[in-house]
Amino acid sequence: MKSRLFAAVLAGTSVFALAACEDANRDGKTGAVAPAAAPATPAVAPAQPGVLDVAAVNSATFAPPPAEPEGVSPVLAKAQVLLDRAGFSPGVIDARYGENVRLALEAFQEARGLPGDGALTAETFAALEQVGGPPAFARYTITAQDVAGPFNSSIPEEIPEKAKLQHLGYTSAAELIAERFHMDEQLLRALNPGVDFRTAGVSIHVANPARPALAGTVARLEVDKEDKALRAYDEAGTLLAYYPATIGSAEQPSPSGSMKVNGVARNPTFTYDPKKLDYNKDIKTKTTVAAGPNNPVGLVWIDLSKPTYGIHGSPEPDVIGKTQSNGCVRLSNWDALHLAAAVKPGVRVQFV
């Protein structure tokens, strides 16, 4: 097993993490959201690729999702928000039926004792609607804090170039807002055509996951390499949460067997040490990347008892579950933060 490095250092009130996994969404305060305006009629108009009506999402009753992989659907948009709210993360909310949505639906069906293989059925949609809560989409007013930055004009690809930056921040207010509401940025922009996201006081449409903290006490985490998923269970074996995950490759495999959570480091830095790592031959000296949502390990690191391995966030939520990592377990930043708030040292972690 190739060596990896993790260390957590307290400096004043800040926590910095040195981590070896490479590859950001915020589960922080969302500000006040208001329900989106109700439609004139409850009918759901047929979905058109690339077009989504917020009022139709909030009033959606079951209809089969579009057959086209790129087709968006108000029913799918509502289902994604309700899955997220129920603790079965579909990944980014994009109103499309992808593999992460299928697996989240399958996990929800299994947990609720419903028949199904991840297809969105009328029975599954009815069960999702029982999750309740506020409307799936809502209005949000952009705040002065949202647009204050500082923002990075761009994020370089290579670690040495990243290391030259003082902060790995968001690249725009639109990226920040999309991540805050668990959304695909393209969907955010499509829902708000012509909006200047740099302007405080502007009212926009956003997804409204309104996801509560986990209802039970996490006793065990299960990392499923085949399904590319992480599941959280209580002591009785009840499934508390499901998250899509990016897991190691054949060349840089994730560990096997059991271990425990050591602790949590929020807002971690990232360090590549060529004396301990060998997946980037071009880096010859120890290189540290500053903290921030676009840091390679995102906004949080959950340290595991197997040295140098962890569960962490990611600056690329749209590819979670669709690529491979260098051995660690990547979640979207919002899912990693949601999980980090619920785990304590000693929680068991099983790789299967």
Image (cartoon, helix red, strand yellow):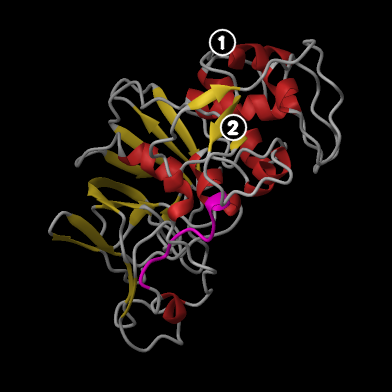
Instruction: Give me the disc on residue 207.
Output: 2
Tag 1 residue: 130
Residue 223 in sight from this viewpoint: no
Residue 124 in sight from this viewpoint: yes
Placement of the N terminus among the 4 image quadrants = bottom left
Residue 58 location (% of width, % of height): 67, 19
Residue type for callout 1:
Gln
Helix, strand or loop: magenta stretch: loop
Q: Secondary structure at mark 1?
A: loop
Residue type for callout 2:
Ala
- Tell me where the magenta segment starts and ends, as one range: 166-175
Q: Secondary structure at mark 2?
A: strand
The one nearer the camera, 318 or 30, is 30
Residue 171 location (% of width, % of height): 53, 61
- Residue drawn 31% across the image and 20% down it: 236
- Residue drawn 80% across the image and 10% down it: 41
Does residue 159 lie above or below 47 as drawn? below
